[in-house]
Image: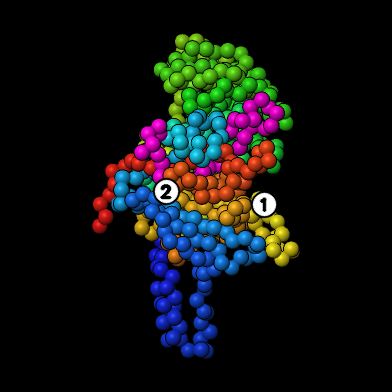
Amino acid sequence: MTRIHRPWVAVAAALGAALALTSPASGADAPVPSPLAAWTKGTPVTVTPGVTRTTWTETALDNRDKARVLQIVEIDPTAGSLTLESAIGTNDSAAETLPQQLARVTSVPTRHPHAGVNGGLFQREPADSGAEKTVAHTGVSATDGTLHSSSCWSGGKGSSGAVIQYGIPYVTKLLTELNLTAPSGETLRIDDINRTPGRAPHCARDTDDVQVSASPPVYTDADEIVVFTDDYGAPVPRPGTDPAVAATADAGFEVVVDAHGVVTEAREGRGGTMVPTGGHVIQGIGTGAEWLRGRLVRDDTVTIDQKLHDVTMKREIPLDDSVDVVSSFHPLLRNGEVPAELPDSCSGTEKGADGTTLICTDSRTALGTNVRGRPVLVTLTGQDNEDGDYLRTFAALLDAPELAIVDALNLDGGGSTTLMTGTQVHTPPTDLVNGTLVHRAVGDAVYTGVGGYGLYAK
């Protein structure tokens, strides 16, 4: 059941009235202070009608030398024609900074996105592989109904994500179903989209995947089929992309398919091919290569079937132009509550101002909705450095009554955390390149911009 959030003053007043009617002997608890009691709210800034950015600055430093900053961008579709979408920038294989990604949304300056944050988790190919600039998404990623990756398996329960449709995000569990059908009618499961065969980043895609690395998390399967879409934008991977993962060395088999589903090439070996416009490249290793080799030849017609299931709502989500998906491992708030299963994780800890107690310095990014049904983009950072909090503490902060957030999904954090409005970035650079701090390149983005139809305010 959704908990109704009320302004903190009203909550305190109601609790105070209840306590006044309670005798001292009853042992009634005092009101629990808001997580934002030690933060100061700045004056909301209007980015454009319907888009406001509000900054909360820490006043009690919580064992830190510098105050942290919580930024909330609220999007009100009753105040203007606004859209909410995800973007991958130049192409799906390359990481770019948030400003670069949002600049590619449109070439018309007056239609530039009003505000945006970095998106879901991703992983680069290993250094010195010849493809280290290539990235792969973790969990389901989609723009305009085009899938860029499959879901995590998680025992058939799928992985968390936010489906963005008609300007509104909703957080759920998602499971992809991908199949390849040969002219004979035989069907085989597709393991993933737009990543190196034999090397799945961050999570298993099925029961055959075996973890081979913990940092970064990498899974392997020697028998796979991976499909590449034309927005991959780079030559598809060659064998040996990851010397530490033996399956990637398999020469395999490769099939090139045009926009009509007709096979134009079916050949031994794989890699270095550009995906034809509107078409696909299919790579197989192990038994996946054997299946392709034995069933597809030039001029055959092949069918690629992709389905996206909403596990929570037990329904299929039609993959049309209205659907974007950004992926994650963890919902932060569900119906106004911090999920019991949310881990209190942190990737980066260091000693705080007292020189002893560890603090978490992971910057955080989130996407959610509030009690008014409005989308919100959230970041937690230092003022001029990477800083944040443990995952559960961040969730508790978002659960503050003043924010009135009902549902929220944790997006990629740490050095990836970036927020911008218009052409101005409001989060600090964190990555050192040639002695200069720069903003990190990321896999995708979530933004609000010109679009939609607007809604009449009641």
Give the image location of residue 256, x and y in percent: 51, 16
* Quadrant housing residue 407: bottom left
- The answer to if 112 sits in the magenta stretch is yes
Label 1 and label 2: CA atoms lie apart by: 29 Å
The circle on residue 82 is: none
Number of the front mark, 1 or 2 = 1
Mark 2 is surrounded, within 10 Å at the Cα level, by few (under 14), some (14 to 19) or many (20 or more) other residues, namely some
Residue 58 locus on image (x, y percent):
55, 63
Q: How crowded is mark 1: few (under 14 residues within 10 Å), some or many (20 or more)?
A: some
Q: Is mark 2 on a helix, strand or loop?
A: strand
**Magenta stretch in the rendered image:** 106-135
- The amino acid marked with disc number 2 is Tyr
N-terminal-most mark, 1 or 2: 2
Measuring 66% from the left and 25% from the top, which residue is drawn there?
A: 130
Quadrant (top left, top right, bottom left, bottom right) of the C terminus: bottom left
413 or 149: nearer the viewer: 413
Q: What residue type is labelled 1?
A: Gly
Q: Exactly how many numbered labels are in the figure?
A: 2
The mark found on residue 348 in the picture is 1
Q: In this view, does 167 lie to the left or right of 299?
A: left
